Amino acid sequence: GFGAAGVEIIRNNLAKGESKGGLVLNTQGTTVQCIFLFCDIRQFTDATESLQEEVFVFTNKIASVIHSICNSYGGSANKNVGDAFLMSWLLSDEKSEGGATRRRSSFGARNSRGPNRLTRSQIKADSALLAVIKISIALYYDKFFLEDMTETKRGRLMKKISNRMGPVVQMGFGLHCGKAVQGAIGTQRKLDATYVSDAVEFAEFLESSTKKFKVNMLMSDAFEDLLSPQVQRRCRKVDQILILEDDMDPDDPDLVEIAEKVDLYTYDMDIDELWRHRARTRAAALRFGGSFDAGTTHSSPDFPRNSDSQRASGSIRPTSLNATNTIRSRRDIFGGKKGSGGAGASDGQAAGSTPPAATRPTGRRRTSLLIGRSKQNAAPANLTGSIMGLGNDAMMPSDGIEYGLNERGVPINMPDLTLPSGRSRYTLSSWNSEDMRIIRKRYSEGLFFPQFNAALQAYYTRDWDRAGETFAIILDRFEDGPSRYFLNQIKAHDGIPPRKFI
């Protein structure tokens, strides 16, 4: 299709009745408020080298998963940029929803209404986050992404990633919301319908920052502000960055007071545990002579097959003053050009530091609160399943078919992946399903969130001895990307906050 922005442009041209010979390109764009999801395929270079001309088959398979799931939850495709995809959710005017509003930053607002009555914006934000979670689970269906490749190319790819844990397709996600100008860029010979906005670039920045924190997704406080309270408490604050204008001095002692702060959040999920749980359930059923009913252990509803039950220009220049190198943005998202280069998070979570080192030619800068130099450190054909697991009516046979994990931690036998073709009705009960409980178990049990919050607070109050000890306690239990990042920062400075630490 033409994407979300393209549909609106064509609709406007038809409404005006002026374009008998083609589209009218001399009109101004339209300002809209959107949620933006930026997705990027990890190690895409390896896939390109291994698959060569078949890389398009591979990429289009991934696109079909992202587009169908996001569309199921009310999102629209906007851009496909090689190894990246831009999705959007158009937000209605906040004034039309009524109710008081509360702003944490100029990036977004949240409506204040009854605890169980969600606004349209809250439903769309919750749905966008849920779409990311379901995409993350769908990526484990290796068979879906590999089955249309030739045996030779598939063998090359598997050899290339043989030392990497996890599924064949791995991605990072950035969620942000803000204003954008939608319009057409180009001529009658080549036309791109797109969004021009700092918000789009910030969503890309968030996705790139997931590599630093080793998390699947990052979301801005603007997006987190839109979530329903029931979902907000499941998100963990992992960082805080400053938005610097070009005329701001990084050495200004009043920088914290004059620069805009943006909190970064993640939704913690252990997708691997979903498959480990299934393997254990399968083994237990066979050990006691029973059958393995996947539907009883994964109660999330399948996607409806045919249901429609629910219906600023400029650029941003992120920078890190404690990094040794400056790297230009990897791509121009609009022109398609490559550049060089948890149930239960408590309120009042502390802020963090240090965005990835990157810069853009003009515009605003993002910097961390840590200012100084640091060291850089084959399935049966008759089995089908939804992306949240097997269908409720599916039974895993107990006649010798193994449901264990391979050396990469991915199930050896998987049901066929069934993608949604219609809209999914959003309900808050989606967050309480058995599958959601399983992927959150590691984080929701014990003292993980209180410990992380205490460590982060100690980190920013310059109590690095206590912060380091608490981050280490967390890491003794299991690997956590944000905890590892901050502990490495402490070690890089020998446990002493630098002079310019804010």
Image (cartoon, rainbow, N blue to C red):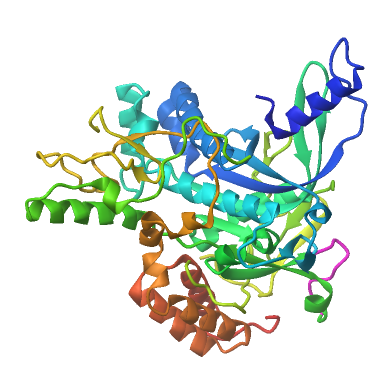
Of the pair 382 and 400, the residue shown nearer to us: 382
Residue 360 visible within the image: no
Along the line of sight, which residue is nearer the eye, 83 or 445?
445
Side of 389 relative to 332 (left or right): left
Q: Nearer the viewer, residue 369 or 250?
A: 369
The answer, for residue 236, to whether it is visible in the render is yes
| Picture mark count | 0
Q: Is residue 239 magenta?
A: no
Q: Position of residue 434 (x, y in %)?
A: 36, 57
Q: Is residue 22 left or right of residue 345?
A: right
Above/below status of 375 relative to 129: below
Q: Using the rendered view, name the quadrant where residue 186 is placed.
A: top right
Is 261 placed above or below 58 here? below
Q: Residue at x 63, y 71 (%)?
A: 353
239 with respect to 162 (left or right): right
Q: Position of residue 133 (x, y in %)?
A: 48, 51
Residue 269 x/y as whole percent: 44, 59
Q: Quadrant of residue 191?
A: top right
Residue at the outermost top position:
21
Which residues lie in the magenta part? 244-252
Question: Percent position (x, y) of residue 189?
Answer: 79, 16
Residue drawn at point x = 26 percent, y = 46 percent: 294
Query: For the N terminus, which image quadrant?
Result: top right
Q: Most prominent secondary structure in the magenta stretch?
A: loop
If the image is split into quadrants, where does the C terminus sit? bottom right
Which residue is rendered at x = 85% and y = 61% of the image? 246
Q: Is residue 247 magenta?
A: yes
Q: As rendered, which of 130 and 94 lies closer to the eye?
A: 94
